[in-house]
C-alpha cells in the first residue's frame, strides 16, 4: 500500500509538471501566430508590423498579451451565433492560454525550427498571402504615383495577358506593394478571343477622377464578356474556392483593375495587380459572383433613399428576389464605409424559413472579410435576400470622416467619405446532395 500511494503521488506530480510546462515558440506558439495573425502582419499588408519570426513576436510580447487576452486581435467581426464560417480567425480559449502562458513563462524559444518562417518569408517575397507561390503574376505596366494632395482617386488599370492555354483556377488575390494607400480594389477578367483586337493599342490606365476619364471608352472593345469578378478590401483574405469548384482563366484577354486610392499626404508609388493559382484537377462546378446593393443589383431599390443627414443614426433595407434556379452559396462579402454601424443579411423562403447569411454587429471598416461557409447554404429560386445596414453619422462616431458631421450619400464613385451598402455573394448551381456537403476549401 505505501508503495502504491507513493507511485500515485509521483504520477500526479508528473501530471502537474506536464500541465505546468511553459509553451515554446516554435512548437506551440508559431503555428497559432502564422495561421491567425500573419495574413495581415506581413510586409505589404495593412498591419503596421510583421509577425513572422521569433524576434518579431517576442519583442512585442507584452503588447500581444494585451490584445489577444482582450480578444481585440486577431479581429473577427462576424457574429458566430448568427452563422459560423470556415475561415474564422478568432483565437480559441486554448490558443489564448498558450500564447499568454508562453509570454508569462519568459517567451522561451524552444528547439529552433526555421523552416516554417523561411517558407512563409519566401511567399511574402513572392508577393502572395496564399499557401504557395503563384502560377501567374500579372502587374500594371509601370508604377502609378499617388499624389500626396489628400485627394481620393479612382484609377482603372489594364493588364493584358496571353497564355499558352486555358487554365483552371483554384485561387486569386489582388496584390499591391503598399495596401495602406488603398481603400478597396476590384478586378474583372475579360476574355478577348478575337485576334484582330489588339490588347495593347489602348491606354494603360484611366484616372476616373481626372480629366482623362473619357479614355475609359477605349476599353469597351474588351468588355463584351466577363469571366470572373473579385476584389480586395482591408482585412480580406485570399479568394479561394472549395474542392472541385473554381473558374477557367481564358487563354487571352485583359484584366481591368479598379483601385480606389484613399487620401495621401505624401507622394507614393503603387504597383498593383493580381496573382493567380492554377490546378490540374478538373473544375466540376463553376463559381459565379453577384453584387447586391450599392454599385450592384438593386442599388436604386435601397429603402429609404440612401442619404444620411448630419447628426443622425439611420437604417436602410434592400429586398432582392432570387430569380435564378436554386443555388448553393459559398461565401458572403458585406461592405460598408466609415459610418457603418451594423450589417445584417438573411434570406426568407416562401415556406417561411429564414436563411442566415452574415451579421456584423459592430462594423469596423479596417477589418472586413470574405465570410466562407462551412457548408453550402441553399438559396432557392424565389427566396428573398434581405440586406440591412445601420449607419452612425454623429460626432460620437470616432470613424466619421467629417467633423462636424455632414450630409452623406451614395452616388457616383462613392468616395470613402460617402457610403455604401453592398453584399457580394459567390455561388454555384444547386446539385443533389449539397445538403450533406462539407466544403474542403483550398
Image (cartoon, rainbow, N blue to C red):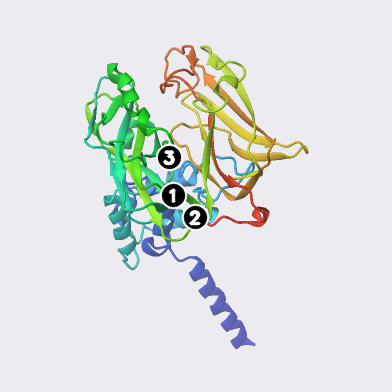
**Residue at the spot of label 3:** 235
Q: Earlier in the sequence, mark 1 or mark 2?
A: 1
Query: CA–CA distance between discs 1 and 3?
Result: 26 Å
Look at the numbered disc 1 and give the secondary structure of its residue. Answer: strand
**Residue at the spot of label 1:** 248
Q: Quadrant of the N terminus?
A: bottom right
- Nearer mark to the viewer, of 3 and 2: 2
- In the image, residue 237 above or below residue 392: below
Q: Position of residue 268 (x, y in %)?
A: 23, 30
Near-viewer residue (86 or 166): 166
- In the image, residue 333 above or below residue 217: below
Q: Position of residue 116 (x, y in %)?
A: 34, 61
Q: Earlier in the sequence, mark 1 or mark 3?
A: 3
Query: CA–CA distance between discs 1 and 2?
Result: 8 Å
What numbered label is drawn on residue 35? none
**Residue at the spot of label 2:** 283
Identity of the residue drawn at 44% across and 12% down = 404
**Any part of residue 77 in sight:** no
Count of numbered circles on the image: 3
- In the image, residue 170 above or below residue 27: above
Look at the numbered disc 2 and give the secondary structure of its residue. Answer: loop
Q: Are marks 1 and 2 in contact (CB under 8 Å)?
A: yes
Q: Position of residue 65 (x, y in %)?
A: 42, 48
Amino acid at each position: 500500500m505505501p508503495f502504491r500511494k507513493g507511485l500515485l503521488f509521483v504520477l500526479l506530480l508528473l501530471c502537474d509538471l506536464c500541465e505546468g510546462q511553459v509553451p515554446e515558440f516554435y512548437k506551440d506558439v508559431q503555428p497559432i501566430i502564422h495561421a491567425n495573425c500573419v495574413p495581415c502582419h506581413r510586409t505589404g499588408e495593412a498591419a503596421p508590423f510583421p509577425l513572422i519570426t521569433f524576434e518579431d513576436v517576442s519583442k512585442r510580447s507584452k503588447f500581444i498579451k494585451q490584445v489577444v487576452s482582450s480578444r481585440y486581435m486577431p479581429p473577427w467581426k462576424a457574429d458566430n451565433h448568427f452563422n459560423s464560417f470556415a475561415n474564422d480567425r478568432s483565437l480559441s480559449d486554448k490558443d489564448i492560454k498558450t500564447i499568454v502562458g508562453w509570454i508569462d513563462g519568459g517567451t522561451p524559444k524552444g528547439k529552433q525550427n526555421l523552416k516554417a518562417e523561411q517558407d512563409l518569408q519566401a511567399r511574402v517575397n513572392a508577393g502572395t498571402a496564399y499557401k504557395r507561390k503563384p502560377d501567374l503574376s500579372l502587374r500594371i505596366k509601370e508604377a502609378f504615383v499617388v499624389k500626396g494632395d489628400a485627394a481620393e482617386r479612382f484609377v482603372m488599370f489594364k493588364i493584358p495577358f496571353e497564355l499558352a492555354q486555358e487554365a483552371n483556377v483554384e485561387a486569386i488575390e489582388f496584390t499591391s506593394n503598399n495596401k495602406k494607400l488603398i481603400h478597396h480594389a476590384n478586378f474583372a477578367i475579360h476574355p478577348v478571343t478575337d485576334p484582330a483586337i489588339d490588347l495593347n493599342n489602348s491606354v494603360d490606365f484611366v484616372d476616373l477622377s481626372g480629366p482623362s476619364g473619357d479614355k475609359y471608352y477605349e476599353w469597351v472593345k474588351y468588355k463584351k464578356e466577363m469571366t470572373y469578378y473579385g476584389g480586395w478590401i482591408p482585412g480580406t483574405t485570399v479568394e479561394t474556392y472549395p474542392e472541385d469548384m473554381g473558374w477557367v482563366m481564358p487563354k487571352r484577354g485583359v484584366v481591368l483593375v479598379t483601385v480606389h486610392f484613399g487620401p495621401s499626404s505624401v507622394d507614393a508609388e503603387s504597383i498593383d495587380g493580381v496573382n493567380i493559382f492554377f490546378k490540374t484537377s478538373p473544375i466540376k462546378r463553376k463559381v459565379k459572383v453577384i453584387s447586391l446593393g450599392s454599385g450592384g443589383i438593386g442599388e436604386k431599390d435601397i429603402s429609404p433613399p440612401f442619404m444620411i443627414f448630419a447628426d443622425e443614426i439611420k437604417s436602410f433595407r434592400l429586398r432582392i428576389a432570387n430569380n435564378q434556379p436554386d443555388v448553393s452559396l459559398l461565401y458572403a462579402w458585406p461592405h460598408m464605409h466609415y459610418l457603418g454601424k451594423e450589417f445584417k443579411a438573411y434570406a426568407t423562403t416562401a415556406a417561411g424559413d429564414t436563411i442566415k447569411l452574415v451579421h456584423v454587429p459592430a462594423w469596423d471598416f479596417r477589418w472586413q472579410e470574405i465570410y466562407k461557409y462551412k457548408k453550402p447554404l441553399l438559396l432557392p429560386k424565389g427566396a428573398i435576400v434581405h440586406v440591412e445596414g445601420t449607419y452612425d453619422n454623429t460626432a460620437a462616431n470616432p470613424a466619421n470622416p467629417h467633423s462636424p458631421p455632414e450630409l452623406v450619400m451614395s452616388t457616383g464613385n462613392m468616395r470613402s467619405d460617402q457610403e455604401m451598402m453592398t453584399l457580394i455573394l459567390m455561388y454555384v448551381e444547386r446539385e443533389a446532395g449539397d445538403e450533406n456537403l462539407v466544403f474542403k476549401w483550398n
